Image (spheres, rainbow, N blue to C red):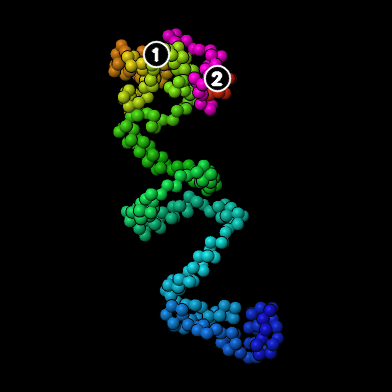
Amino acid sequence: MEKCKICNREFKNKKSLSTHVNHKHNINGKQYYDEYLKKDNEGNCVVCGNETTYRGMGVGYLENCSQECRDKNKELRKKRSEVAKGKKQSIEHIQKRIKNTNQIEKEKTRKKTVLKKYGVDNVLKLDSVKKIISEKSKGRKNPRTEEWQNKIIESKRKNGTLKHTKKTKEKIKNTLKKYFKKDTNRSKYIPKNTNKRHISGWYNDIFFRSSLELSFLINNSSKELLSCETKEYGITYQYKGKRKIYYPDFTDGEFIYEIKPSTMLKYKDNKDKITVGKEKYGEKFKVITEKESPYVSKEKIFSYISEGIVKLCNHSSTILEEKYKH
């Protein structure tokens, strides 16, 4: 409740009080405020001392006389910062903004504005900004948690920005080509379970990509076999005008082994792979099919799994149960 200092009549708020003094006592709100409510030094800018603006009986006088002084007012900035910290948008409001905003067009507009102002479409490309970020990041490690990553993906999915643009895809492609040419160590760039139609996993810590490869490892357990998917064994060749690198499967230190079912020897570029393998290694290059190394039984594989000799990738257990017929 607000009480009139002249007639002691009470009002619900200062707006009603201001109307009252204007009509009943013939003075405006500023005159009443100056006479009865104004505090010491109120009405003078806290930064430069100049006169400030009166903004109504509810607010009184502003603390600062101008935008420049307001920006210099540390106490005011601190108050606003504290208010902003505790102010959160509702989920409904956020969802409404996402629904009514074309994120792709918004991003295009943002890039145009930044390009016009700074000469680049992203301020992170500026050397001065890179330097600041680099200095602030020294010694800091902020690993991206799974929860954090899932939130990013979900947000991009809602905004329609989850997929890479053609420009970004081309950039990734060129970057991979650049590094792949410098270092042909396949294990750095290619994930282990590339083909989920075949069983894959580890036999005595040697990775295999098919049941025939696993059968070969089991059938030749007396040999000290190693994987050939390293820079040492990579062979460059051309297929349909594209530069590719071929890796044989295993080696025992004397021979190089390529494991392929007989039905796959002429599939796509397998014929070219075998040709370049023979050109490089000659008689030491051996192509092994199910004729030279028969498939082992499903029961035997399960036996090795129980003993810990074979470890399957996650998808392979189902394939072994449902599709493996040997």
**Residue 123 x %, y %:** 38, 55
Left or right of 283 on screen, residue 316: right
SS class, disc 2: helix
Q: Mark 2 — residue?
A: 306
- Between residue 181 and residue 191, name the one nearer to us: 191
Q: Earlier in the sequence, mark 2 or mark 1?
A: 1
* Residue 305, above or below 127: above
Q: Residue at x 65, y 83 (%)?
A: 17
Residue sitting nearer the eye, 25 or 103: 25
In this orientation, does residue 173 appear? yes
Q: Quadrant of residue 35?
A: bottom right
Given contact means CB atoms under 8 Å apart, are the residues at marks 2 and 1 in contact? no
> In the image, what residue type sits under mark 1?
Lys
- Which segment is the magenta one? 289-315
Q: Is residue 261 visible?
A: no
In this rendered view, identify the residue nearer to me: 63 or 121.
Answer: 63
- The numbered dot on residue 223 is 1
Q: Amino acid at mark 2?
A: Ser
Which quadrant is home to the C terminus?
top right
305 is within the stretch colored magenta:
yes
